[in-house]
Image (spheres, rainbow, N blue to C red):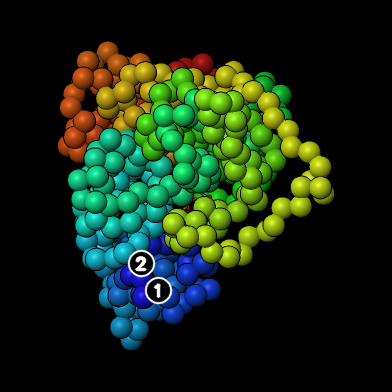
């Protein structure tokens, strides 16, 4: 039996992972499931899968979790430290699907045990990619991409010589506002930004898809996974989300990965790797689909892409700063404090203030510095948001 743990089990990726595991329950021994506010779901899944332990990141919810698990034999725990402790429990395969930089610490703990880490949590790669990959190498651990584009690139590279790779093209659906007139974007509401034309995902990544911050994180993620230079990575808008990525080789060949927009493919590939097993995803009928379309990304509509290129140029702790500023700006948009288009302005202004500090590019990349930069960037982004709000009040009063 394979011992598996799922971090972020109550979320969209976590639930898709559980769906796959439940189809073959005798093959898996579930060690840990973690979640956040959704205690009912966490307890239900922990009981059903007979997990050893269920953990919520919210300490104040421990009594609720204990109640929900009473008599089940499943241990209950709470808090960020308890999540990291759960990652210390031996497991053969771990799904990292917490949203945000909070996924970094448990991911690192898991890698130190030499496990196989299926990595959906792109924020940990953007924040501390080099540390994560070095830790994996040092402990003989394996990191398998779960983001659909990166799973697609990974699959297109099987058996290939990496030195023959000329370029990597990741596709983008364009999200909710792909076809909106540019002048309407400033008025985009939370509800409108939270609905994706093709993929069913968590709210944060759905909004990030509309702003292309998701794709900007994925540009950086591509560099971290495949060690290609930024100018070898391209973004292609592909509204149908059927081709997830393409790899271009020195002989002119392009290997494309084609499949339905269903995360259970990438999750299942990482679960069964290096084998392929039957997965419950739709089989595409290309004759019925008839045509797939492509267009170049528009930097005016999606300034996040330009910012990601700047972050890749800066290197150092710029990824940590970028992700943290983005997370803070997204919090502010969700809270109704800033508009949709303000998110990119807030991130850019935050990065501008931080680049005046030479530490951004030159400080050693270690976990302490990454965490300090994450903290600093959230604070600076908060200041930028406050300044913008007070300027608005002056204009309107
Ligand atoms: P969701 O918001 O649906 O789920 C996030 C999970 O993390 C939930 O279990 C949530 O708990 C938990 N969580 C939230 N905050 C914290 C925290 N501070 N500490 C610990 N746990 C926390 O996200 P998704 O499943 O959509 O995304 C998960 C990750 O996978 C993200 O990094 C995303 O970018 C990436 N990804 C997602 C894709 C998708 O299709 N959804 C595609 C590619 C990548 P609760 O809900 O109980 O509060
Ligand atoms: Mg993706």
Q: Secondary structure beneath disc 2?
A: strand
Q: Is residue 131 visible?
A: yes
Q: Position of residue 193 (x, y in %)?
A: 60, 39
Q: Secondary structure beneath disc 1?
A: strand
Q: Residues within 10 Å of mark 2 (few under 14, many from 20)?
A: many
Depth check, front residue: 111 or 299? 111
> Which residue lies under the disc numbered 2?
4
In which image quadrant can residue 85 be found?
Answer: bottom left
Q: Which of the two discs, 2 and 1, labels the residue nearer the N terminus?
A: 2
Label pair 2/1, CB-CB below 8 angstroms: yes
In which image quadrant can residue 307 be found?
Answer: top left
Q: Which mark is residue 274?
A: none
Residue drawn at the location 56% of the way across and 55% of the way down: 265
Q: CA separation, marks 2 and 1?
A: 7 Å
Residue drawn at the location 40% of the way across and 24% of the way down: 229
Residue drawn at the location 64% of the way across and 23% of the way down: 296
- What is the tally of numbered marks visible in this picture? 2
Q: Residues within 10 Å of mark 1 (few under 14, many from 20)?
A: some
> Which residue lies under the disc numbered 1?
28
Q: Position of residue 4 (x, y in %)?
A: 36, 67
Say left or right for 19 vs 118. Answer: right
Q: Is residue 378 visible?
A: no
Depth check, front residue: 9 or 180? 9
Q: Position of residue 269 (x, y in %)?
A: 49, 56
């Amino acid at each position: 039996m394979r011992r598996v743990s799922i971090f972020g089990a109550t979320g969209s990726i976590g639930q898709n992972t559980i769906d796959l595991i439940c189809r073959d329950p005798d093959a898996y021994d579930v060690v840990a499931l973690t979640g956040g506010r959704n205690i009912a779901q966490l307890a239900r899944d922990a009981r059903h899968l007979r997990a050893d332990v269920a953990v919520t990141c919210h300490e104040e919810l421990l009594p609720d979790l204990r109640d929900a698990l009473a008599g089940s034999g499943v241990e209950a725990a709470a808090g960020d430290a308890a999540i990291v402790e759960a990652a210390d429990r031996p497991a053969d395969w771990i799904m990292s699907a917490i949203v945000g930089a909070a996924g970094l610490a448990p991911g690192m703990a898991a890698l130190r045990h030499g496990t196989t880490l299926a990595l959906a949590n792109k924020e940990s790669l953007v924040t501390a990619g080099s540390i994560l990959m070095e830790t994996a190498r040092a402990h003989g651990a394996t990191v398998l991409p779960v983001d659909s584009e990166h799973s697609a690139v990974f699959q297109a590279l099987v058996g290939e010589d990496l030195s023959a790779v000329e370029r990597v093209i990741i596709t983008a659906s364009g999200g909710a506002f792909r076809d909106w007139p540019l002048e309407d974007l400033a008025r985009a509401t939370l509800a409108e930004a939270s609905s994706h034309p093709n993929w069913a995902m968590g709210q944060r990544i759905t909004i990030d898809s509309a702003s292309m911050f998701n794709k900007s994180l994925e540009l950086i993620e591509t560099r971290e996974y495949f060690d290609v230079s930024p100018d070898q990575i391209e973004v292609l808008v592909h509204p149908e989300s059927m081709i997830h990525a393409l790899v271009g080789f020195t002989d002119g060949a392009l290997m494309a990965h084609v499949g339905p927009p269903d995360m259970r493919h990438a999750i299942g590939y990482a679960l069964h790797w290096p084998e392929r097993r039957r997965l419950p995803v739709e089989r595409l009928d290309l004759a019925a689909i008839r045509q797939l379309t492509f267009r170049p990304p528009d930097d005016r509509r999606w300034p996040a892409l330009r910012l990601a290129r700047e972050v890749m140029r800066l290197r150092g702790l710029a990824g940590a700063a970028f992700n943290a500023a983005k997370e803070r700006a997204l919090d502010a948009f969700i809270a109704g404090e800033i508009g949709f288009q303000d998110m990119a302005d807030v991130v850019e202004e935050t990065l501008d203030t931080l680049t005046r500090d030479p530490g951004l590019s030159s400080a050693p990349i270690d976990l302490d510095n990454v965490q300090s930069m994450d903290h600093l960037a959230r604070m600076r982004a908060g200041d930028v948001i406050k300044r913008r709000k007070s300027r608005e009040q002056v204009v309107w009063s």
